[in-house]
Amino acid sequence: MKGLILPGLAPSFYSEVVEFVETNPHAVKRFEQASKVLGYSLLDAFKVATVYDNEVMECAFFVNTIALTDCFEEQYKVKPDIVICPSFGGMAAAVYLQSVTFEEGLLISYNSSLLSNKWFEKMEEYHTIFIYNLSAEDRQLLIENYKSNGDLLEVVGIIDKVTAICGKAPIIKKLKKEINRKEKCISLYVMYYPIHSQLLSKMKFDIKEKVFDKVEIKQPNIPVISDVSGELVKSTEAFTKMLLDGYDHAVRWDLVSKRLEETEIENLYIVGPKNLFSQLLKNKYPTISLDPYTVMQSNDYVVGGKKND
C-alpha cells in the first residue's frame, strides 16, 4: 500500500519558497488562480506577510501544497491507498480528495482564517511552543510540575519526536528557556496563538456555522487516517468532523502511527512546503519527499518558456 501525507503545522515564508512560487509552472498557475478568487494578488501579499498575517500565510500554504500535489501527480502518476493530512494540511487534502474544489478550499481557508483572527485577538496571552526530543515521561513530568505551581499547560500535538504545548505567553517563555537548558531537547519555534487547543472549542463551532456549513463537502475518494483519533475516515460526515476537530483536538501522530502499522504501508509520499515529516519518518518508512526544494532540484520546470537545465 502507498500513503500520501499532506502536512500542516508549520507555516512557510516567501523567502523559503521564493524560487518555487516564482518559477514552477504549477505554483505560478495556482497563485494566479487564487488571486482571481480572492480579488487581490496573493503572491504580492505573501511576499510581505508576517506571522501575524494569518489568512495570507494559511492561504499561501494551501496554494503551495496544492501546487505540489500537481507536481506529485505529474511526476509519480500513482494513486495512494491512504491519505494523512495533519493540522491545516486538511483543506489541501480535501481538494486532492475531490471533497471540495480548489476555489471552495481556498475560500474556506481564507474565511476560516479571518474568523480565527478575531478569536485570536481575544487570546493574545496564549502561545504554542514546538519542542523536539521531549520524551513522553519528561513531557508528563513537566506538565505536572508546572501544574503544581499553578501554571497550566496543554499538550496540543504529539508528532513523533515533536511535542506542541499551549499555554499563557509568560509560561511558554519560561518553558522555552527551560527546554533550551535541557540536554538533547530543542525549542523549535513558537506560534503566537493557540492551535489544536480546547481553548478553541467555541471558535470551532463559530467556523462551522459561518464557513463550513456554507459549502457542500463531498465524500473523500480515498480513505483518510484522522490526525486526531487515528481512525480510518471514509464518509462525508466523518471527514468534515475530522477537519473541524483539528481546531480544538490535539494532533495525535502516535495514533496515526499505530494505524499505519496495521496497513502495511510500502511507501509514504510526503508532499508539502515543509519537510518536517520527512525528517521524522525517514527512518521508519520508505519515504519519498516532494517539497519546493526537491521539485526545483529536479530541473523539470519551465522558466520563461524554456526548460531550465
Image (cartoon, rainbow, N blue to C red):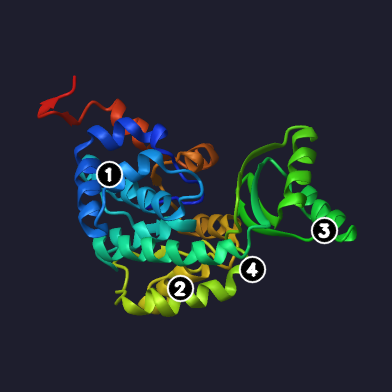
Identity of the residue drawn at 61% across and 56% down: 157
Q: Earlier in the sequence, mark 3 or mark 1?
A: 1
Q: For residue 17, which quarter of the picture? A: top left
Q: Residues within 10 Å of mark 3 (few under 14, many from 20)?
A: some
Which type of secondary structure does the marked residue at label 4 adopt? helix
Q: Which residue is mark 4?
A: 199
Q: For residue 88, which quarter of the picture? A: bottom left
Disc nearest the viewer among 2 and 1: 2
Using the rendered image of the protein, determine whether residue 5 is visible from the camera's viewpoint. no
Q: Earlier in the sequence, mark 2 or mark 4?
A: 4
Q: Earlier in the sequence, mark 3 or mark 4?
A: 3
Compare residues 286 and 252 and report the one nearer the observer.
252
Q: Earlier in the sequence, mark 3 or mark 2?
A: 3
Residue kind at label 3, given as amino acid type: Asp
Q: Earlier in the sequence, mark 1 or mark 4?
A: 1
Residue kind at label 2, given as amino acid type: Ile
Question: How far apart are the alpha carbons under marks 3 and 1?
Answer: 45 Å
Which type of secondary structure does the marked residue at label 2 adopt? helix
Q: Residues within 10 Å of mark 2 (few under 14, many from 20)?
A: many
Compare residues 146 and 121 and report the one nearer the observer.
121
Tell me the tag on residue 207: 2
Using the rendered image of the protein, determine whether residue 259 is visible from the camera's viewpoint. yes
Compare residues 240 and 248 and report the one nearer the observer.
248
Q: Which residue is mark 3?
A: 151
Question: How far apart are the alpha carbons under marks 2 and 4?
Answer: 14 Å
Q: Residues within 10 Å of mark 4 (few under 14, many from 20)?
A: some
Residue at the outermost right position:
148
Question: How far apart are the alpha carbons under marks 3 and 4?
Answer: 15 Å
Answer whether labels 3 and 2 touch (C-beta < 8 Å): no
